[in-house]
Image (spheres, rainbow, N blue to C red):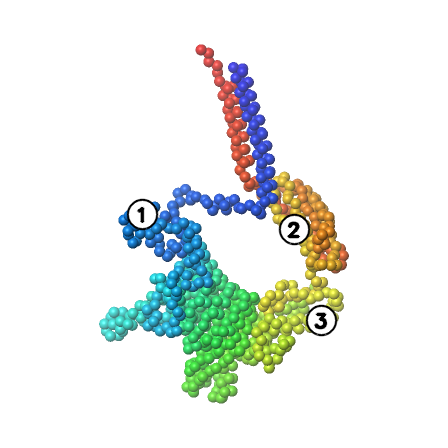
């Protein structure tokens, strides 16, 4: 019995000793794994994401439908019933099934589906999914022709984030319209001779097309952030607006208020037969680019309504050229067309505008109220024309009610009348809160050769002021909002010259002259040193609006730069940080300054156990003015308290220094080091820890069993 007890104690001791060894191995493995992870963090994929990508469905979750498993949203919408039938077929078809014309193969593998989808969806090919060549565009499109065509539908390709608008029923051409079908025609109306069957067919046909447009609008609203893509030959026909235009505030097109990311290939849509698209893209606040619409070609004899077309599109940027629009048609209604649209980085070339209306109301050519009210950016408006063919009846009915002019029959009288009611009307640019009796503050710049617009804008100031700062002194410039595009080769105003399209140089020349004059005035006023220079505090871009900003008179910005690699790092408690390399460089080729790191931040660094070690100069790279490394293990009295309460602590270190020769330039770089107790790499320590606890438990159990067992003698 004594021997058995000794054996049990020895076994327990052995197991306890083994558990201690395993604990030490686990700790060593943890340290090496964590250090390796920190060193290679930029090269390692995210483990959690990788595991999620292949995660199995949760227990109890609905099983995926065999018919649609692995299919793209587009393929699910194309032929869902047919695909489902094919997917649920057995792996091997019977001979009878093979003879059946309706037998379909199983869905393609995922790789083949991706290739198929890539072939089907091509942003540059509007005829995708159509197979054969598309029919030519139509030269004319009457209602009788339209009633033989298909409408349109919308589907989504969620993988490509596309809203695809295409002709229905596999057709190669279709149209979208909101043409008013008129009063409902019932069978009783036909029976009593108040209508014909043709009237009923007309009503039912265009009511269905209105319903399709409404369905497309709803579908687009359900897919924010998607891009439009039109397939096949698609026409916008006559009215594209639901509601009474323009007085019905609810009137809008199927694209109004959308939250699309892009208009895609909307320029491929045929608009020759469109007569009105009031509020076409009103309040489409996420769209940044409308360049595609510059491809549209309108038909001259269709008087197009452009009211509120782009109103509220507050994200527009870049350069958009609509100058070629006007050669194809004549605008008759432009109220609020660009109201509250654009950003400071938006340039709109709206040249060659024809204000023309033959034999109609004078209101038709003069309704420019709020066309550019609140418009932001730059408006280029060269070669604007007014041409009004009138009759005595029109003048009597419209003109005399609007203006008490007795000389409306003469050319001079007509010109005066039209100017008063259109181009010289302040309502063209809207009213602002800042506007006073003799002063306008516009939200946009105008570059034009039109004398009426220039006269209107002569007293207008741009809404942004230019400021020039020297130390604590600031001077302000308020410059014109309108600039004459008729300039000579030096960009000086010359009304005998044709309009220039270089809007940036036109405005910059005038702004630079005003700034230089103010700078000279300030130099004399404040006795500014000659070696100080004037420079913008923000980047000047392609648009003249970027010229209107704050300028500073100071020594030139330093060409000395400081860089830290890596600028951020996370370590666990007691781990030595990877060396952080600090490098200071200059862009100069010669007359390089010398540089020194400040001592104060190095002292603070030492308080938390870290050290900065300067590097020796590199004779092969003279542009490196100074360099060094930060290393060590963070030791801080408050670290334990932070780790106990929050589990981590972040140290922010600002490295500073300055040049010690030539002009003094200061530079700095902020670093972040986070200390944590969490070890998120590998599972070997956890496994080893569990094993050691298991061995301890076995050892104790064995000891108890052997020591407590009674000896039974036969």
Q: Residue furthest top?
A: 714
Q: Residues within 10 Å of mark 2 (few under 14, many from 20)?
A: many
Q: Earlier in the sequence, mark 2 or mark 1?
A: 1
Q: Earlier in the sequence, mark 3 or mark 2?
A: 3
Mark 3, secondary structure of its residue: helix
Which image quarter is the C terminus in? top left
The residue beneath circle 3 is 520
Front position among marks 1 and 3:
1
Q: Find residue 690 and report its horizontal and vertical position in percent.
A: 52, 32
Whether residue 533 is situated above or below residue 300 in the rendered picture: above
Left or right: 507 in relation to 407: right
Mark 2, secondary structure of its residue: strand
CA–CA distance between discs 1 and 3?
Answer: 91 Å
Q: Find residue 366 and report its horizontal and vertical position in percent.
A: 48, 78
The residue shown at (42%, 71%) is 271
Front position among marks 2 and 1:
1
Identify the disc placed on residue 564. 2
Q: Residue 597: in sight, yes or no?
A: no
Hey, which quadrant is residue 391 in on the image? bottom left
Front position among marks 3 and 2:
2
The residue shown at (61%, 77%) is 487
């Amino acid at each position: 019995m004594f021997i058995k007890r000794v054996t049990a104690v020895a076994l327990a001791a052995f197991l306890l000793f083994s558990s201690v060894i395993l604990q030490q191995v686990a700790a060593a493995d943890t340290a090496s794994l964590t250090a390796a992870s920190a060193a290679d963090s930029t090269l390692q994929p995210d483990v959690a994401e990788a595991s999620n990508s292949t995660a199995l469905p949760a227990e109890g979750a609905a099983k995926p439908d065999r018919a649609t498993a692995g299919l793209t949203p587009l393929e699910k919408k194309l032929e869902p019933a047919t695909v489902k039938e094919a997917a649920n077929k057995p792996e091997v078809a019977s001979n009878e099934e093979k003879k059946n014309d309706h037998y379909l193969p199983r869905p393609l593998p995922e790789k083949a589906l991706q290739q198929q989808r890539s072939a089907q969806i091509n942003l540059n090919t509007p005829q995708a999914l159509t197979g054969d060549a598309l029919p030519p565009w139509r030269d004319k499109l009457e209602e009788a022709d339209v009633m033989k065509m298909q409408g349109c539908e919308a589907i989504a390709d969620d993988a490509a984030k596309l809203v695809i608008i295409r002709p229905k029923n596999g057709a190669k051409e279709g149209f979208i319209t909101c043409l008013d079908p008129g009063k409902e025609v019932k069978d009783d109306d036909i029976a009593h001779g108040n209508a014909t069957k043709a009237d009923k067919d007309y009503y039912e046909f265009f009511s269905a097309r209105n319903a399709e447009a409404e369905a497309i609008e709803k579908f687009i609203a359900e897919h924010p952030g998607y891009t439009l893509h039109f397939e096949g030959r698609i026409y916008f026909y006559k009215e594209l607006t639901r509601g009474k235009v323009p007085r019905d505030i609810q009137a809008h097109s199927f694209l109004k208020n959308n939250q699309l990311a892009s208009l895609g290939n909307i320029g491929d849509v045929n608009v020759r037969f469109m007569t009105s698209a009031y509020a076409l893209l009103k309040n489409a606040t996420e769209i940044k680019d409308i360049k595609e619409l510059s491809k549209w070609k309108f038909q001259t004899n269709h008087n197009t309504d452009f009211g509120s077309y782009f109103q509220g599109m507050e994200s527009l940027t870049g350069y958009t050229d609509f100058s070629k629009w006007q050669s194809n048609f004549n605008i008759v209604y432009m109220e609020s067309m660009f109201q509250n649209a654009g950003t400071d980085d938006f340039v709109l070339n709206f040249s060659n505008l024809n204000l023309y209306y033959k034999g109609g109301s004078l209101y038709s050519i003069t309704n420019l109220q709020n066309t550019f009210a609140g418009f932001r950016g730059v408006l280029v408006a060269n070669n604007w024309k007014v041409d009004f063919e009138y009759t005595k009846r029109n003048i009597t009915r419209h003109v005399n009610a609007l203006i008490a002019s007795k000389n409306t029959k003469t050319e001079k009288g007509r010109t005066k009348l039209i100017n008063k009611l259109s181009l010289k009307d302040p309502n063209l640019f809207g009213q602002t809160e800042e506007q006073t009796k003799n002063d306008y503050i516009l939200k946009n710049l105008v570059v034009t050769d039109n004398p009426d617009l220039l006269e209107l804008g002569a007293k207008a100031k741009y809404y942004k002021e230019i400021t020039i700062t020297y130390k604590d002194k600031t001077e302000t410039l308020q410059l014109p909002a309108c600039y004459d595009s008729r300039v000579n080769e030096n960009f000086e105003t010359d009304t005998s010259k044709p309009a220039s399209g270089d809007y940036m140089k036109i405005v910059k020349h005038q702004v630079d002259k005003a700034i230089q004059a103010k700078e000279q005035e300030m130099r004399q006023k404040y006795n500014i040193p000659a070696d100080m220079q004037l420079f913008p505090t923000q980047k000047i871009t392609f648009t003249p609006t970027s010229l209107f900003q704050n300028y500073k008179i100071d020594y030139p910005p330093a060409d000395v730069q400081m860089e830290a690699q890596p600028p951020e790092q996370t370590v666990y408690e007691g781990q030595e940080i990877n060396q952080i390399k600090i490098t200071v460089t200059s862009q100069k080729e010669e007359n390089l300054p010398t540089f020194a790191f400040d001592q104060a931040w190095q002292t603070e660094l030492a308080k938390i156990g870290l050290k900065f070690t300067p590097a020796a100069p590199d004779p092969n790279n003279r542009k490196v003015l100074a360099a060094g490394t930060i290393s060590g293990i963070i030791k801080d009295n408050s670290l334990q308290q932070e780790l106990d309460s929050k589990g981590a602590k972040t140290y922010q270190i600002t490295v500073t220094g300055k040049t010690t020769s030539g002009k003094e330039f200061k530079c700095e770089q902020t670093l972040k080091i986070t200390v944590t107790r969490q070890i998120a790499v590998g599972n070997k320590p956890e496994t080893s820890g569990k094993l050691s606890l298991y061995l301890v438990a076995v050892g104790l159990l064995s000891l108890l069993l052997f020591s407590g067992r009674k000896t039974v003698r036969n």
